Image (cartoon, grey):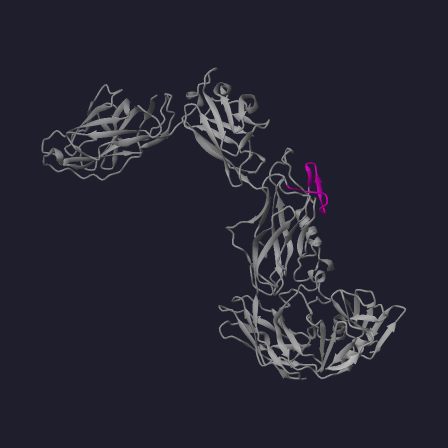
Amino acid sequence: MKKFISMVMAAAMVVSLVPATAFAAQDDVKATAKVVDAENYTVDSTTTVDRPVGNDAEVQLTVTSADYAAGSAGTATFDFTLDNAKATNAFNVQYIIADGIVYEWDGTDKFMSKESTPRPLVDASGTTVKLTSLDYPYAGKDEFSITLTGKMERGWVISITPDSEMEKATKGKTATVSVDSDDMKITNGDDLVYAAIEAEGIKASVKDTVDVAVEEVATLKDIKIESVVGNFNAFLDTTFGTKDQLKLKLNSGFEFALASGATIEGNGAPVALSSIATVDDDEIVINADDLSGIVNTDKLTIKGLQVDAVSAKAGSTATVRVYLTGCDTVSVEVAKAIDFNVAMSVDEDEDVPVIYSGVDVDNTGIVSDSDHKSLEVTIKESFAGAWSNSKDFTLSLPEGVYITEVEAAHDGDFALTSKVPNNIVTPNGPTADERDWFGQAYQEGDHLNLEFERRTWDETNPDVTGKDEAAEITFTLTLVADPNFEGDVVLKLEGDALETQEVTIAKFVKPFVVEAQQNDMQIDYRNTEIPTSVVIKEAEAGLWDKGTEFKLALDKIEFDDEGKIAVDSKSGLEIKDDEVKEDDGVLYFTVDGRSDDEPATVTISGIQLYMQRSLPAGAYDLDVWSPTMLADKFDVDGDPDSTATKGYLVEDLFAPVTDEAIVADVNDDFVSYTAKAGFVNIVTAGREDTESFTTKVVVPVGESYLISGENKVTIDVPAYINANGYTMLPLRAVAVALGINSNNVLWDQTTRTATIMYGSKIINMTYGQKVVYVNGAMIPATAAVEITNDRMFLGLRDLGNALGVTDITWDGATRTATLNGNK
């Protein structure tokens, strides 16, 4: 069937006018032909559309040379030939552009300017240009002519707008026009395409694809079927008994599931698909006569249709092919098959935030705009019901990284249960503050991991109305880190019903780095100078704020003198009083002015030690930290002092600040600011001085602790009385409690021998032997050396003899051994 195409004027072109000269030759008058705004459109190939479907194309002739003999008439006839089209209406000169002015045909013979006072177009000789001849009648013809009088001048643009119909309007067909003239040489005048058919009839779309788990069912987004040639009634025969049909077919691996609420909508009320559609697994067929009441429109919408991934493999795509009688077949992707899972992700396009370690969330002591927030994390189930609430799950962070706050939200299908603190019950069902849910999980994890207990949230259920969307929860963590932690913060998701997953949510860098070397030292007393320097480098220029304090301390050794401090010459950093100071054996200095364009380098040299002569040989660590950055007062052991109100890791940890909320109290070992392990290595032990054992040590039999001075120390294996009635004490625990460095209590698994180095003594004892060696001399023991639960035990009196402790008492009533009880 034929299709009608109307071509009308496009935008006017402005071309400068160049006056003609006067010498004769037909070939000296030339023009170039082209088509402007050729149409690409879609029509149905089997039905006549009795209205215009496109009005944009025009044929333009641009005069490129116009040399006429004096006195010549200047008449030009243009011959047009159509291919795959015939004229249906006027094929006229619509306008002429001359000297930048548009002149429109007045419908009779002249061309009048588009000005406030129209005037006719005249050529250089003053003759009015006219349309003097039209090839009437032209309807139904594929060849016709137009004649203009007047001398065509160089730069003129002549626009011809043909109305025609295509003889074959099927996909891939084109309509062309050729232009020729005996009075003017036409360039590029052959087979100019002014219309083309790209597709036929309909197009289909969905707003978005949906995920469907393998062997599960999912509801599709609305499928829209649109007519590109107007009303469906224009070509779809809805007469009862006709064979016109609308058909939808799925590809292999998928089948349709026709839900009771599925409908098709157009003009008028929605129609239930169950009442008009025939469903055969992967195909739905609807007869056109069943659509007669709703197809007086150019768009049909199918809602609530479901797809079942019966045998699809994960990653495959469900595609619906749409067939409509008389139209091209079109396809649309509607779903993707996925595995049954819960996925954790972050936005890959977002930069990983960089945070400084060892500082609070207010960045006390440094100048930084970091808000300590991680990337936003999303945990989402692949489909409704994939996330089982009958299993625990855990979110874990690297050791040394802690959470101070959480910002979280979930979609409407992820409900928290009443087990969550401060749960709020609303008329629409239970909701809760996600912050409290995270806070409870963090307390359960002892501030180390987020441990979410089972059934603290409600899983989604695809069989329950209103809970058929996949659950999703998003959250952002505010983080702080141990001063010695640096590197990526990798969040790990684990659980019995989950695949272990990891995402990087932040990165920590140190605000300063310390460079120091090991120093082998011989035991001495006062003013023992360390031969090497300690260098502290700023991470970036201007980072350390004015008033920021730094401290240096040694394990079990005090600094005896301040030493010297020097700042590089380029950074501009200033140190208060230009000196390093000493207080109670600890060195410190304070920033008095920030660095400028270069990061600062601070060098401390000439450091001297006060070394107790009883110090055992071994390695002693150097600690360097900033109490300002820690936003708290810490002593050398890393514990908050009595005046502290909150630890540096704490803003509130999901609760008002209390002793229980301070991470330092929950985990005494969280602070680590060792800058150089073994900074001082004593290679000669101090002189023997058994009188230096002054610490009172109380060991109750059967208890998992002992008392060292005023400190209660937990031990993993308690003292006991053996089968022979001897009181057996844990060797390492008691030795350390008395004051021996733990590094100087050694164990040789091969020979099952323990060695204690104290002062000038080297004490050896071997499992099963009833003897102890002190500096190679054998000392008989009353009880054989025993091993219990991987710990070595020695008899009470034998241990005292070996270490030179003479003040030993036993209280039979309380079953308690005491060493140095009278000191």
423 drawn magenta? yes
The correct choice, above or below, for 231 with respect to 804 in the image is above
Expressed as whole percent of the image width and height from the top left, the position of residue 708 reads 78, 71
Q: Residue at x 26, y 27 (%)?
A: 83
Q: Compared to 760, does 14 lie above or below?
A: above
How many marks the image carries: the answer is 0
Q: Say which residue appears at 63% left-offset and 63% top-offset.
A: 482
**Residue 222 part of the magenta segment:** no
Q: Is residue 711 above or below residue 441?
A: below
Q: Is residue 571 left or right of residue 762?
A: left
| Residue 116 seen anywhere in this rendered image of the structure | no
Quadrant of residue 638 in the image? bottom right
525 to the left or right of 161 = right
Taking the view exactly as shown, the residue that stands out farthest to the top is 240
- The image position of residue 475, as x and y in percent, is 61, 49
- Can residue 555 be seen here? The reply is yes
Query: In the picture, which quadrant includes the N terminus?
Result: top left
> Viewed as shown, does residue 312 lie left or right of 184?
right
The image position of residue 95, as x and y in percent, is 25, 30
Q: Position of residue 388 (x, y in %)?
A: 65, 42
User: Magenta region: which residues?
Assistant: 414-430
Image-based side of 813 in relation to 579, left or right: right
Q: Nearer the viewer, residue 71 or 509?
A: 509
Q: Residue at point 80% right, 74% down?
A: 696
Q: Quadrant of the C terminus?
A: bottom right
